[in-house]
């Protein structure tokens, strides 16, 4: 399994979770994000072809909310926000407020998920961040498949 995860890190479709939203979340929401990160990593571990999983925007404020054992995960963890870490022309920021629907994966792109758990809906927060950096956006086709 570890070899498959390492191979995914090297050549898998890149997915980054940007956890630089901590200042917008309560402690309860931050803990929920940590649980969701753990779930996402567990699912990725089971995939035949894992994603190249990145956790961006780590700081002393965000590190304390990460799941136990995070340091042993096969992920790339970086301090910079995703839009500062990756070339902007490669980023597709996934946001529910995008007018564009994601219909396929492009292996040359980086799919950024805003690590924002919002018990109170904070409309357009991730879309605004993407627009501020001038990156492409898309939403997952949940409505079309629900």
Image (cartoon, rainbow, N blue to C red):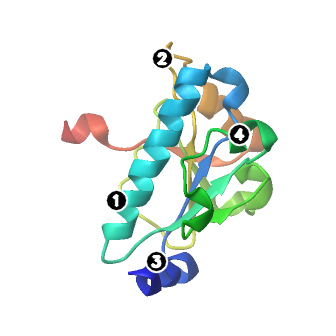
Q: Considering depth in this image, is 65 or 116 the residue closer to the camera?
A: 65
Q: Residue at x 48, y 17 (%)?
A: 119
Label 4, label 1: how many angstroms apart (C-alpha)?
22 Å
- 109 or 115, which lies in front? 115
Residue at label 4? 62
- Name the residue rendered at 20%, 42% in the picture: 145
- Which callout, 3 or 2, points at the residue further toward the start of the chain? 3
Q: Which residue is painted at 73% across and 48% down in the image? A: 58
Q: Position of residue 3 (x, y in %)?
A: 45, 87
Q: Residues within 10 Å of mark 2 (few under 14, many from 20)?
A: few
Q: Specify the label residue 43 is tagged with.
A: 1
Circles 2 and 1: CB atoms closer than 8 Å: no
Q: Which residue is mark 3?
A: 5
Q: CA distance from mark 4 to mark 3?
A: 24 Å
Q: Earlier in the sequence, mark 2 or mark 4?
A: 4
Label 1 packing within 10 angstroms: few (<14), some (14-19), many (20+): few
Can residue 142 be seen at all in this image of the molecule?
yes
Query: Which sits earlier in the primary sequence, circle 4 or circle 3?
Result: 3
Spatial CA distance of label 2 from label 1 is 24 Å
Density class for disc 4 (Cα within 10 Å; few <14, some 14-19, many ≥20) is some
Q: Residue 72 in the image: x percent, y percent? A: 57, 67
CA–CA distance between discs 1 and 3?
A: 12 Å
First-in-chain label (4 vs 1) = 1
Residue wearing tag 2: 119
């Amino acid at each position: 399994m570890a070899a498959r995860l390492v191979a995914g890190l090297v050549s898998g479709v890149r997915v980054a979770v940007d956890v630089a939203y901590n200042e917008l979340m309560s402690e309860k929401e931050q803990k929920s994000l940590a649980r969701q990160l753990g779930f996402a990593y567990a699912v990725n571990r089971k995939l035949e072809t894992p994603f190249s999983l990145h956790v961006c925007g780590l700081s002393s404020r965000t590190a304390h909310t990460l799941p136990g054992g995070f340091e042993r995960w096969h992920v790339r963890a970086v301090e910079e926000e995703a839009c500062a870490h990756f070339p902007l022309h490669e980023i597709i920021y996934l946001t529910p407020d995008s007018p564009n629907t994601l219909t396929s994966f492009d292996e040359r792109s980086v799919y950024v998920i805003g690590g924002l758990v919002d018990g109170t809906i904070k409309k357009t927060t991730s879309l605004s961040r993407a627009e501020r950096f001038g990156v492409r956006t898309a939403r997952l086709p949940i409505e079309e498949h629900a």
